[in-house]
Image (spheres, grey):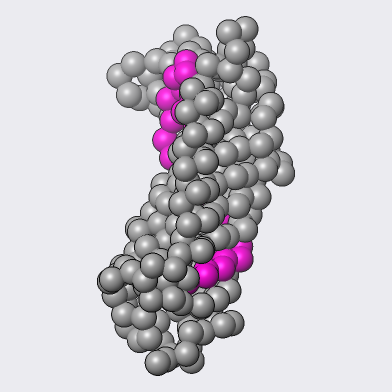
Amino acid sequence: MQKRVVLYLIILATFLSSLANAQIGEHRNDLQIGGGAGYVFSNIGFTPKVTQSMHGGFTAGIATKYVCEKYFNTICSVYGELNLTQAGWKEDIITADDHPVINPQTGLAETYSRTLTYIQLPVFAHLAWGKEQRGMQFFFQAGPQFGYLLSESSKANFDIEKANLDDRSNKTVAQYNMKVENNFDYGIAAGLGIEYTLPHAGHFIIEGRYYYGLGNIYGDSKRDYFSKSNNNNIVVRFTYLFDIVKTKKQ
């Protein structure tokens, strides 16, 4: 599995490098920078399973895009971001017949969530179709993403040592007492979006993106409790870019 992951990342890095140095189509030399923000829906792919709903968090950071070539109708770019992102998981604590589990000490439905705050660096091959100078483009982008955990925090409305396990349909609770063991995170992200360009005003981008973590937040050896515990994120993001370098019209 690890060899396959490394191979995927090498292929993606080679593709990005080839875009940056492409000379087959019409050359471009456009550099844009800016920033963006969005909302993150996330969970953790636990094995053994932990029943979850989507954890909500924010993401924001700087962005840059280098347009290097137009090949037929495809505008080829390298796109990158540096973001502060809230990921994590929120548990769906229910009975076998889908009712909330009531804690006998508090009389409230049990709730638990963990927020993981990362600094993230996605680097994408960005392929777009549409108007370059003024108007709309549709784009697809994909590439590797790397992250480093800055902090984690938990929210529970019950004593985690006195969880109501008798009524739970899912009795996996080892994660309550486990801090993240692997601060470094890596995986592959891909997204679709639209970009609207106005001369002298900049580039307005809205995008939906999915990230699949290839690493685990906890140890995954035979002696560890979880064999899998990877990040999964769905991101809806708005970005604004302005031109630093622009290819002159012929």
* Residue 132 versus residue 85 in the image, above or below: below
Report the residue that reaches farthest toward the front.
Answer: 24
Q: Residue at x 37, y 63 (%)?
A: 127
Q: Residue at x 32, y 73 (%)?
A: 137
**Looking at the picture, how far across and down is residue 125, in whole percent?**
45, 57
**Looking at the picture, how far across and down is residue 164, in whole percent?**
52, 15
Nearer to me, 74 or 175: 74
Q: Residue at x 59, y 82 (%)?
A: 244
* Residue 113 versus residue 247 in the image, above or below: above
Q: Is residue 122 left or right of residue 22?
A: right
Q: Which range is magenta?
A: 44-67
* Residue 180 versus residue 9 in the image, above or below: above
The reply to whether residue 220 is in sight is yes
Main secondary structure found in the magenta portion: strand
Residue 57 lies in the magenta-colored region: yes
**Looking at the picture, how far across and down is residue 96, in whole percent?**
34, 16
**Looking at the picture, how far across and down is residue 215, in whole percent?**
56, 31
Q: Examine the image and state in which quarter residue 226 appears.
A: top right
The reply to whether residue 75 is in sight is no
Q: Is residue 154 left or right of residue 67?
A: right
